Image: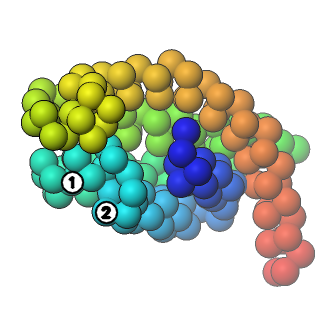
């Protein structure tokens, strides 16, 4: 995993707990994460560059719209769970894990839906390491390896950060 991609994952994992501030904040932070991902399509992501050269609009949907939707739903889910979480504990875990899973499902789902049957040119395949079925490989690895790891990390770190953010906000009020 590239340093740029790791930084993106860390940024998204640490922004998920802020979804405890509500769906609007979740959508905004998802949008910020999505825009940074979209910008990376032009500044060093080989897959992003290839997808952008195929269709800038579909790439925008995959990078930005899916992240806004994940943040919005994560904030809504937290709000619903928090109403039933008397000790204010498990709702942070649900929000953090759902943020990771929603992001993965929406991103990979949109990637598959919008780019599954795209045939790469020989030049595009070469820039991606000579693999012409890179999307299927990326989706399989992200869903099978990356998603479970991200869910566990977000459950631990995201929950702790979310609780800390909520406590800090209550103290400020």
Identify the residue shown where x is 32% and y is 43%: 47
Task: Tell me, yes or no, whether the two marked residues, 1 and 2, touch with CB atoms within 8 Å.
Answer: yes
Q: Secondary structure at mark 2?
A: loop
> Is disc 1 surrounded by few (<14), some (14 to 19) or many (20+) residues within 10 Å?
some
Query: Hey, which residue is sitting farthest bottom in the picture?
Result: 173
Real-space Cα separation, disc 1 to disc 2, in angstroms: 8 Å
Instruction: Give the percent coordinates (x, y) of residue 112.
Output: 25, 30
Identify the residue shown where x is 39% and y is 57%: 44
Relative depth, front residue between 100 and 149: 149
Instruction: Give the percent coordinates (x, y) of residue 92.
Output: 74, 45
Q: Secondary structure at mark 1?
A: helix
The colour scheme is rainbow
The tag on residue 99 is none
Relative depth, front residue between 127 and 94: 127
> Is disc 2 surrounded by few (<14), some (14 to 19) or many (20+) residues within 10 Å?
some
- Residue at the disc numbered 2: 42
Instruction: Give the percent coordinates (x, y) of residue 68.
Output: 41, 57
Work out whether residue 95 can be spotted: yes
Is 57 placed above or below 112 here?
below
Identify the residue shown where x is 21% and y is 54%: 52
| Number of numbered discs visible in the structure rendering | 2
The tag on residue 52 is 1
């Amino acid at each position: 995993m590239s340093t740029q991609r790791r930084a993106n994952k860390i940024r998204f994992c640490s922004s998920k707990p802020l979804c405890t501030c509500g769906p609007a904040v979740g959508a905004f932070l998802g949008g910020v994460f999505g825009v940074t991902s979209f910008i990376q399509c032009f500044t060093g992501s080989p897959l992003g560059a290839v997808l952008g050269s195929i269709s800038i609009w579909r790439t925008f949907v995959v990078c930005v719209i899916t992240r806004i939707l994940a943040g919005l739903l994560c904030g809504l889910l937290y709000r619903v769970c928090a109403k039933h979480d008397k000790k204010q504990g498990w709702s942070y875990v649900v929000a953090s894990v759902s943020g990771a899973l929603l992001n993965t499902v929406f991103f990979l789902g949109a990637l598959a839906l919008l780019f599954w049957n795209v045939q790469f040119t020989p030049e595009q395949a070469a820039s991606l390491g000579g693999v012409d079925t890179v999307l299927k490989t990326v989706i399989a690895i992200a869903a099978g390896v990356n998603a479970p790891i991200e869910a566990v990390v977000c459950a631990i770190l995201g929950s702790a950060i979310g609780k800390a953010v909520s406590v800090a906000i209550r103290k400020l009020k």
